[in-house]
Image (cartoon, helix red, strand yellow):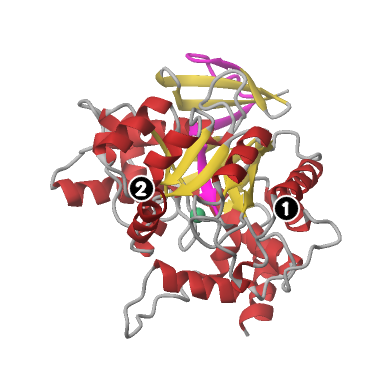
């Protein structure tokens, strides 16, 4: 058994002093406050639970910053997607794994301790199956394993280019399955995760564009865990859904699927008040990706209405254009402040915005990723130690420390990150940084040089 002792820790019931945390097989077995340090176990400063990153496409990390040039006819999500399709034509399994490992290492260094990998790049460059049809899922699992990041694998079902079962376009050839083929992929994913005892397997119908109603039903029936779907990210998608069905995407989903707490609705940017209420009442998590949504010009989710209706949310790094747990929460709050022209506009009472955002996002992500949240008995021993010597965080305690990390600190705010009781980040750097970064650099040389 391993134990650590924290001078301060944010527990599910609030801040506590002198907290001893006992860990066995990666899980917390006991938490006791007001315990004197015995001088034997590792002594930490201020500790909070790790944050889950509920939505990622790891390979897109390598194209970050390469799509920031305007076009004569105006750039958009859809022109970005064209570039992304061309980029992924160059990815083989080794390159893919090297990029994913770099992205996962950066996630850990920024405070994310588990990722929901919304994994859709399944097949070889020409669209043919690999010898193991789950080869790329094996690579996702290997990247998570070598970095130590917790993994909730969400293999994506993708069959169509638009609503109404439209035939896929050639650029989508690496994503495609029919329902039977997808069931085989799911078996392959189970095999890929066998060596990772705390990995979680779910399913991800890519979007209402990419699945027919019958296919969606089949996927829900075969789901072994969480169900994630991209929804209502762009107004063009909303218009196309209305033209196809007479209903908006979220409205259609709730009318045609039994959406409950297993579901994570990723983006849900464009929703009307009725849809906000439906989502909140269902117990589903809305997966917000503020940096990517800003980068792609998606729009702003009606967050305050959703929160007031009792909605649950978490954050994801999605395109990984910038990987930063604090920045996701900061931008989530700032987008709302800009739109609502007020300060501290989300937290319902007179409480710290940082504390409220952090707790809500930690709980929402844990639900969406199929694991227990918080520093409690039975939860994974995923811990962050804030650096109280960081210039932005000195002479602060409790909520003010969280506020200062999320709103006022740049890099280096985390001293250590533990996953399943193992310390993976020391003084802000991943313990295998050099090797992972060198392999990433070589991979970029192959695809971009
Ligand atoms: Zn996405």
Q: Residue at x 70, y 61 (%)?
A: 97
Q: Which residue is mark 2?
A: 246
- Which SS class for mark 2? loop
Q: Residue at x 16, y 46 (%)?
A: 340
| Residue 61: quadrant of the picture | bottom right
Q: Is residue 216 above or below residue 102?
A: above
Q: Which residue is mark 1?
A: 137
Q: Is residue 14 left or right of residue 93?
A: left
As drawn, the residue found furthest toward the left would be: 341
Magenta-drawn stretch, dominant element (helix, strand or loop): strand
Label drawn at residue 445: none
Task: State yes or no: Cβ of the residue under disc 2 lies below 8 Å from any atom of ligand 1.
Answer: no
The C terminus appears in which quarter of the rendering? Answer: bottom right
Q: Is residue 153 above or below residue 16?
A: below
- Residue 71: x and y in percent read 35, 83
- Residue 51: x and y in percent read 49, 39
Neighbor class of circle 1 (other Cα within 10 Å; few <14, some 14-19, many 20+) is many
The N terminus appears in which quarter of the rendering? Answer: top right
Q: Which is closer to the viewer, label 1 or label 2?
A: 2
Q: Residue at x 74, y 56 (%)?
A: 139
- Residue 389: x and y in percent read 40, 44
Q: Is residue 183 left or right of residue 394?
A: right
- Which SS class for mark 1? helix
Q: How many numbered marks have been drawn onto this rendered protein structure? A: 2
Front residue of 166 and 284 = 166
Q: Earlier in the sequence, mark 1 or mark 2?
A: 1
Front residue of 279 and 255 = 255
Residues in magenta, as a range: 30-56
Query: Marks 1/2: CA distance?
Result: 37 Å
Q: Is residue 282 visible?
A: yes
């Amino acid at each position: 058994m391993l134990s650590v002792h924290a001078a301060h820790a944010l527990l599910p019931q609030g801040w506590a002093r002198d907290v001893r945390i006992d860990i066995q097989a990666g899980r917390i077995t006991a938490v006791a406050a007001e315990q004197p340090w015995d001088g034997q176990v590792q002594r930490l400063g201020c500790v909070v639970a790790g944050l889950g990153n509920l939505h990622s496409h790891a390979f897109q990390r390598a194209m970050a910053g390469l799509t920031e040039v305007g076009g004569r006819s105006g750039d958009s999500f859809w022109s970005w997607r064209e570039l992304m399709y061309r980029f992924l034509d160059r990815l083989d399994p080794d390159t893919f794994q090297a990029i994913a490992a770099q992205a996962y290492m950066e996630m850990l260094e920024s405070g994310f301790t588990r990722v929901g990998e919304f994994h859709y790049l399944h097949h070889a460059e020409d669209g043919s199956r690999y010898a193991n049809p789950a080869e790329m899922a094996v690579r996702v699992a290997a990247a998570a394993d070598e970095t130590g990041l917790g993994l909730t694998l969400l293999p994506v079902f993708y069959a169509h280019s638009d609503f109404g079962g439209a035939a896929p376009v050639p650029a989508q050839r690496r994503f495609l399955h029919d329902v039977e083929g997808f069931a085989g992929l799911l078996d392959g994913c189970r095999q890929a995760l066998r060596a990772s005892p705390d990995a979680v397997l779910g399913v991800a119908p890519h979007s209402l564009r990419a699945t027919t109603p019958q296919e969606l039903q089949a996927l829900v029936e075969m789901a072994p865990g969480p169900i994630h779907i991209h929804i209502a990210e762009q107004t063009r998608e909303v218009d196309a859904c209305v033209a196809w069905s007479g209903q908006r995407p979220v409205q259609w989903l709730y009318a045609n699927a039994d959406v409950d707490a297993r579901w994570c609705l990723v983006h849900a940017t464009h929703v009307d008040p009725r849809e906000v209420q439906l989502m909140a009442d269902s117990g589903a998590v809305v997966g917000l990706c503020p940096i990517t949504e800003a980068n792609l010009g998606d729009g702003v989710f009606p967050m305050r209405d959703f929160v007031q209706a009792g909605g649950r949310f978490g954050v994801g790094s999605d395109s990984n254009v910038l990987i930063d747990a604090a920045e996701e929460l900061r931008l989530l709050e700032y987008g709302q402040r800009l739109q609502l022209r007020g300060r501290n506009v989300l937290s319902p009472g007179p409480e710290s915005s940082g504390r409220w955002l952090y707790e809500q996002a930690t709980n929402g992500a844990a639900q969406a990723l199929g694991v227990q949240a918080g520093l409690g008995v039975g939860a994974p021993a995923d811990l962050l130690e804030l650096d109280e010597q960081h210039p932005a965080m000195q002479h602060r305690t409790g909520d003010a420390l969280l506020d200062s990390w999320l709103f006022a600190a740049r890099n280096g705010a985390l001293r250590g990150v533990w996953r399943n009781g193992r310390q993976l980040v020391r003084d802000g750097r991943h313990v295998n940084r050099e090797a992972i970064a060198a392999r990433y650099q070589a991979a970029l040389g192959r695809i971009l040089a």
